[in-house]
């Protein structure tokens, strides 16, 4: 169960999280349900094509370039952060579907605020539930593979 080590800019992660929280709160206050879908789409695209992540690009091209924010680069497995981001994007997609597909406004905002709340927890307390789930699922997968290998080898 080797971990893939890459470099992660924690400031970029914090910018991503603060963007999610700000935009979801703004969407709620201004009743812009479509903005929930846009944020979800940004998260999904940034998960599938990390270099195309809109929040990452805004951070790099504006905030880091003009030294408004300073990078904090660490060696770390970026996969867990991408998993958490993708999970947030999926939940925001379900929120938008709840709004437009099923007219379930309370469910939609609940899902959107769940994503915003978890981003806020990560931003303020440095606890990423999506990363935690990723690592637990990865460990479970390792144990299942090990168990399966033992059974088939006997």
Image (cartoon, rainbow, N blue to C red):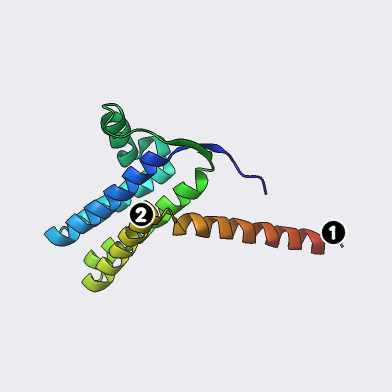
**Separation of marks 1 and 2 at Cα, in angstroms:** 47 Å
Hey, which residue is sitting farthest left in the picture?
A: 30
Q: Secondary structure at mark 2?
A: helix
How packed is label 1: few (under 14 Cα within 10 Å), some, or many (20 or more)?
Answer: few
Answer yes or no: is residue 93 visible: no
Vertical placement of residue 71 versus 139, above or below? above
Residue 127 placed where, x, y %?
A: 44, 56
144 vs 94, left or right, is right
Residue 77 placed where, x, y %?
A: 54, 43
Vertical placement of residue 23 versus 100, above or below? above
Answer yes or no: is residue 1 visible: yes
- Callout in the foreground (1, 2): 2
Q: Which mark is residue 124?
A: 2
Hey, which residue is sitting farthest top in the picture?
A: 65
Report the front residue among 79 and 108: 79
Q: Secondary structure at mark 1?
A: helix
Q: Disc 1 or 2, which lies upstream in sequence?
A: 2
Q: Quadrant of residue 59?
A: top left
Circles 1, 2 touching at the beta carbon (< 8 Å): no
Residue at horizontal 30 percent and vertical 39 percent from the top: 54
Q: Quadrant of residue 57?
A: top left
Residue at horizontal 84 percent and vertical 59 percent from the top: 153
> Split into 4 quadrants, where in the image is the C terminus?
bottom right
Residue 74 placed where, x, y %?
A: 49, 37
Residue, disc 1: 153
Residue 67 placed where, x, y %?
A: 28, 28
Residue at horizontal 27 percent and vertical 67 percent from the top: 108
């Amino acid at each position: 169960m080797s971990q893939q080590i890459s470099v992660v800019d924690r400031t970029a992660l914090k910018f991503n999280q603060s963007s999610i929280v700000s935009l979801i709160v703004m969407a709620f206050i201004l009743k812009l349900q479509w903005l929930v879908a846009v944020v979800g789409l940004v998260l999904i695209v940034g998960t599938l094509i990390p270099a195309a992540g809109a929040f990452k690009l805004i951070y790099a091209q504006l905030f880091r370039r003009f030294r408004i924010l300073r990078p904090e680069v660490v060696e770390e497995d970026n996969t867990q952060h991408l998993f958490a981001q993708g999970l947030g994007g999926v939940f925001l997609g379900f929120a938008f579907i709840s709004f437009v597909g099923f007219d379930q406004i309370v469910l939609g905002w609940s899902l959107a605020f769940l994503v915003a709340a978890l981003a806020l927890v990560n931003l303020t307390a440095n606890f990423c539930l999506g990363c935690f789930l990723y690592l637990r699922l990865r460990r479970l997968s390792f144990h299942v593979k090990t168990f399966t290998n033992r059974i088939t080898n006997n």
